Amino acid sequence: MSSLSSVDPQIAELVRAEERRQADTVKLIASENYVSKAVLEATGTVLTNKYSEGYASKRYYEGQQVIDQIETLAIERAKALFGVNHANVQPYSGSPANLAIYMAFLNPGDTVMGMGLPFGGHLTHGWSVSATGKWFTPVRYGVRKDTGRVDMDEVREIALRERPKLIFCGGTAIPRTIDFPAFAEIAREVGAVLAADIAHIAGLVAGGAHPSPVGHADVISTTTHKTLRGPRGAMLMATSDEHATALNKAVFPGLQGGPHNHTTAAIAVALKEAATDEFRAYARQVVVNAQALAEELSSRGFDLVSGGTDNHLILFDLTPKGIGGKPAAQALDRAGLETNYNTVPFDPRKPFDPSGIRIGTAGVTSRGMGVTEMRQIGAWIDQVVTALAKGEDEAEHVIGRVHAEVLELTSQFPAPGL
Ligand SMILES: Cc1ncc(COP(=O)(O)O)c(C=O)c1O
């Protein structure tokens, strides 16, 4: 970073500080990961200088000899990795990608059905504060109180009653396998377009550690920066020409201008990495690690939503521990364990001060940690939470001790790209 250091030492120092923070912290945020050095390098290239509105061989600016090849490579890799006929790699991020699905298939006011935010759905699946909830008519499904899982009979009932034009499956805090065939059957029955939002689990799908929505969902949306371990970006995929054409038009010119070519190149690199045996082993280990961490927490009396996990994500309710999710997440952060506070299904508390915490194992697995480390992390979470429930003085002492142990662990598992 020699140029950055001389031009803007303030920003250079802050980037270094963030790099140190990432190196020294156990990243348990379920939506984050560490990209490889190759992906990082691709994001920092001269491709950022180029405007490329349109699609390969049909652009509105000259000078696309190289960019067309890069975008085509990214598309071909996405198609091969996920087994789809069409891919669009231009959406700026997951939210604009989802908005493009509305633009492609709905008119303002039409009905969209998605999982409610408090149950694990994403804002863009029709939640009230999102444009998707304001400009369309949202109907929601949730999970059963007794199982913490989606009840497909209830989904069918709501769909038959409300007749949505678009159904979203997938979400942002779902610890269990998404039943794509069952959603597809319901969508077919009511004549809705089925969109599978695999933002969280794309890496697991690519690595064979979660069933694929291909062959079930009409369109697939994903971010590229979570379990897929690419740059911040998104993709839309489809099997039929008709759906693909509608999605392409919605992305450009419907919603976006020029694609971020440096991101496209980094997505291509991440897709190449995700097509390796090494990545498949990584995806499997992410799940093994999440299940080991879930077991550890469960054995220590934590109340896990749905009782465990099938993927990379664990959601737990801290009510039985006598504290809220927010103070617990803040205390864990001071101990070097980075999580986020989260609502749990049927949460009586407010979203900014909810009852739960969401964690995931994509980042720690990228650092090479395994089951032994997961058990240790589970023990640390328990120690900090239990101490916090007893009071701040007790907590400070435990947080200090755990933080020292976290630094010892992170020094043994260097993060990729740092
Ligand atoms: C399921 C799901 N869809 C969409 C998004 C939106 O992605 P972005 O934050 O890149 O807009 C997220 C982000 O967390 C997500 O979890």
Image (cartoon, rainbow, N blue to C red):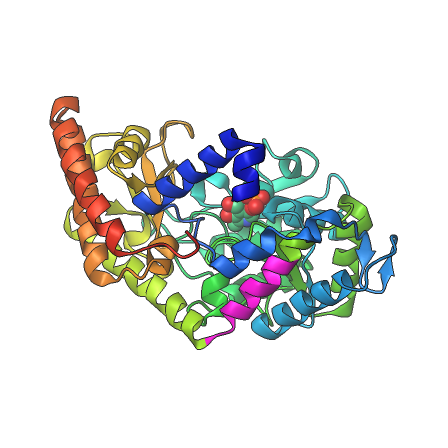
> Is 275 colored magenta in this rendering?
yes
Q: Which corner quadrant of the image does residue 343 belong to?
A: top left
Q: Is residue 11 above or below residue 296?
A: above
Q: Is residue 67 visible?
A: yes
Lateral position of residue 371 relative to residue 417, left or right:
left
Is residue 180 on the magenta stretch?
no
Residue found at x 20% / y 48%: 408
Residue 275 in the figure: left or right of residue 342: right
In this orientation, does residue 140 appear? no
Against 268, residue 163 (above or below) is above
Image point (16%, 29%), residue name: 395
Task: Point out residue 271 in the picture as x, y percentages from the top left corner.
Answer: 56, 66
Is 382 in front, or is 4? Answer: 4
Q: Is residue 37 above or below residue 351?
A: below
Q: What percent of the width, then of the height, locates residue 25?
A: 31, 43
Is 321 on the left-hand or right-hand side of 36?
Answer: left
Residue under the point 46% across and 46% down: 142
Image coordinates of residue 104 in percent, x first then y, are: 76, 52
In this rendering, position of residue 394 left or right of residue 61: left
Q: How many marks?
A: 0
Label the magenta part by its dominant secondary structure.
Answer: helix
Q: Which residues are magenta?
A: 265-276
Q: In the image shown, does 20 or 303 lie closer to the viewer?
A: 20
Across and down, in percent, residue 259 comes to: 73, 51
Q: In percent of the image, x 54 and y 63: which residue is there?
A: 270
Question: Where is residue 332, by image quadrant?
Answer: top left
